[in-house]
Image (cartoon, helix red, strand yellow):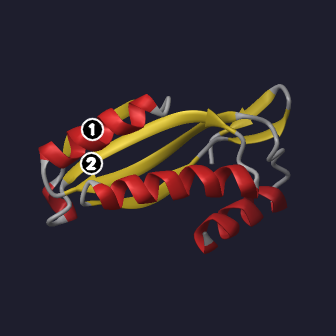
Amino acid sequence: MMSNRRVLEILEERGDKLNVPREVNHWIYFKNEEDRGAFERAVNVQNFTTIDSGFDQNYGEYAYKLVVAKTENVDVGDIDSYSSLLLALAEQFNGDYDGWECPMILNDDNAEDN
C-alpha cells in the first residue's frame, strides 16, 4: 500500500486526474505455468483481461510472467482495493505481485503514458 501511495503522489504532482478511469496494468510472476494459469482464470472472473504472459529466465524462480489489466480509477481506495485483491490471489496461487502502472490523464481528452 505504501508503494501505491508513492505512485499516486507522483501522478498527482504531475497533474493527473486520479478520478478518471483508465486501463491499469498489473504484473504478477509465478514459479510455474500451472499456478499462472490458475491465477489467470481467477482474475478473469473478476473482469481482469490478460494483456501478456510469458517466460523470462531473468526473473529467477518466478520466471512465468502475467500482465492483467482492468479499467479502473486510481484514487487511493480503488487502487488499494484492486492491488490487495491481486496480492491475495497471487499469494493463493504461489505468485509474486509486482505492482501496477497506468497512463497519466491530464484532462478528460488527454492521456499520456506514465
| N-term-proximal mark, 1 vs 2 | 1
Calculate the distance from the C-alpha at mark 1 to the C-alpha at mark 2: 5 Å
- Can you identify the residue that label 1 sits on? 53
Residue at figure coordinates x 57%, y 49% from the top left = 82
Residue 49 in sight here: no
Left or right of 41 on screen, residue 19: right
Q: Residues within 10 Å of mark 2 (few under 14, many from 20)?
A: many
Q: Residue 49 at what x, y percent from top left? A: 44, 29
Q: For the N terminus, which image quadrant?
A: bottom right
Q: Mark 2 is on which residue type?
A: Lys
Q: Mark 1 is on which residue type?
A: Ser
Q: Residue 68 at what x, y percent from top left? A: 42, 38
Residue 86 in sight here: yes
Q: Which mark is residue 25?
A: none
Tell me if residue 19 comes above or below residue 76 in the rendering.
Answer: above
Q: Residue 86 at what x, y percent from top left? A: 45, 52
Name the one closer to the observer, 23 or 49.
Answer: 49
Circles 1 and 2 in contact, beta carbons < 8 Å: yes
| Local SS, label 2 | strand
Residue at figure coordinates x 83%, y 25% from the top left = 109
Left or right of 99 on screen, residue 89: left
Q: Which mark is residue 65?
A: 2
Left or right of 61 on screen, residue 102: right
| Local SS, label 1 | strand
